[in-house]
Image: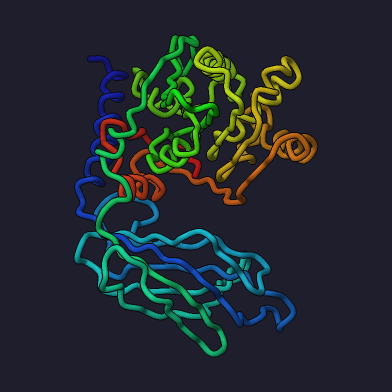
Amino acid sequence: MGSSESKIEDFNEEYYGLQKKIKDVEWEYILFEIISLENLPKEFLGLDNPDPTIKLEAIGGSVDLPITPPPNECQFVTRWDAKTPVWNELGFVAYGKGQVEKVKIKIMDDNKILKDTLLLEKEVPIPKDIGKWSDEMVLKEKDLTIKFKMRRDTKPVQNEDAYKNMDLKEIKFNVNGKVGHETGIQASLKYHQAESNTKAVMYFPGLVDTFRHPHLLDLFSSEGFDFYSLDPHGCGRTAKYLKDPRYAHDVPEQNFDAYIKDIDKTIEFMKKSKDYDSVLVYAHSTGAPIFLNYYLNKRENDNSIAKYFDAVIMNGPFLDFGGDATDGIGSSCNEFILESILTRLPFFASKNLNATSADKNEFVMFRARRWILYNTPVDSSIICSTNTTI
């Protein structure tokens, strides 16, 4: 065995081994909902609104796994210049079952230059009941008041049976994709159809993700939608077809144009399947700029294809995807949205943009959450790349 093949084998053993270790932990986790945070003190001699952030720690719940940040810690995104901040997202801390009795809550005034100012630090007992939200809880420090709820769970949101019951069919497209030094990589489309459905959803996962959300499939199926989820070549589940998985999820030649043929093949397949009354795009994370790059290209070169889509939903769209990648697709996409999409398509977008990175020998907390909450089967889990979008 050559040194290159040996390195690839070591890489696979390390990453898939970590996935299994994460799944083997008997996890318990707590969800944290912020209802309100009021009466925050002003900063800089009372002239400016504060920049609050909230940190959670399940005390004593550390797990001996290379996960960054530790799963028993969580920090909400700072709300800048916020007199009455609002957090729509849920906090999440996880730990080994039976390890934790209390959660520490810290409220900080984030400061980019000076040391953060501690506004509140208190410990609260974890909920006794499992699988249900607690009553509203209140903590105070002088006039500052935070109201919140917690939910303690020991079971994942989904399990392996739920994935099998999605009953998705798969078709592979020969797009002669190039990933790293390898060529001939196929794209993969998974889909679910019902004879009575007259509408369709085309789902674009994040760059390193794949579709694994049974509840979303159930929602669209109940509303009369056929469902199609594309993993372009080298992305998502197609990574397992690579000889060297270290190249998985790299944008080929730093240009999303590499995925145009993959999307063309998907639309050809959908058109041959049915003449749909309407087609909805659901794009998550990096799936948003991948779709928008395609839409831009087709609007300029083949507007009949661009008109195939009736609406788009963007969930956490990663529109500021690197300056070099896709020749600055981030700025192009933002300009395009302002000038075109808002006047052409029903458009819904969240503002939860985030990107993080992982070194070779660690996993970002995002991935651990996926395995803990959704109990993703090990053999379908995705290798961690250097760039991970949320």
Quarter of the image holding residue 98?
Answer: bottom left
Residue 390 is left or right of residue 68, and the answer is right
Say which residue appears at 23% left-offset and 37% top-offset: 17
Nearer-the-camera pick, 138 or 50: 138
Q: Is residue 317 above or below residue 63?
A: above
Nearer-the-camera pick, 387 or 29: 29
Say which residue appears at 42% left-offset and 29% top-offset: 236
Residue 366 is situated, as x and y percent measured from the top left of the image, at: 41, 48
Residue 354 is left or right of residue 133, and the answer is right
Q: How many marks?
A: 0
Q: Is residue 100 above or below residue 342?
A: below
Say which residue appears at 55% left-offset and 84% top-offset: 144
Residue 287 is left or right of residue 231, and the answer is right
Quarter of the image holding residue 121?
Answer: bottom left
- The answer to whether residue 258 shows anywhere in this view is no
Q: Is residue 348 above or below residue 292?
A: below
Residue 214 is situated, as x and y percent measured from the top left of the image, at: 37, 40
Colouring convention used in this rendered image of the protein: rainbow
Residue 362 is situated, as x and y percent measured from the top left of the image, at: 35, 44
Residue 277 is situated, as x and y percent measured from the top left of the image, at: 61, 25
- The answer to whether residue 72 shows anywhere in this view is yes
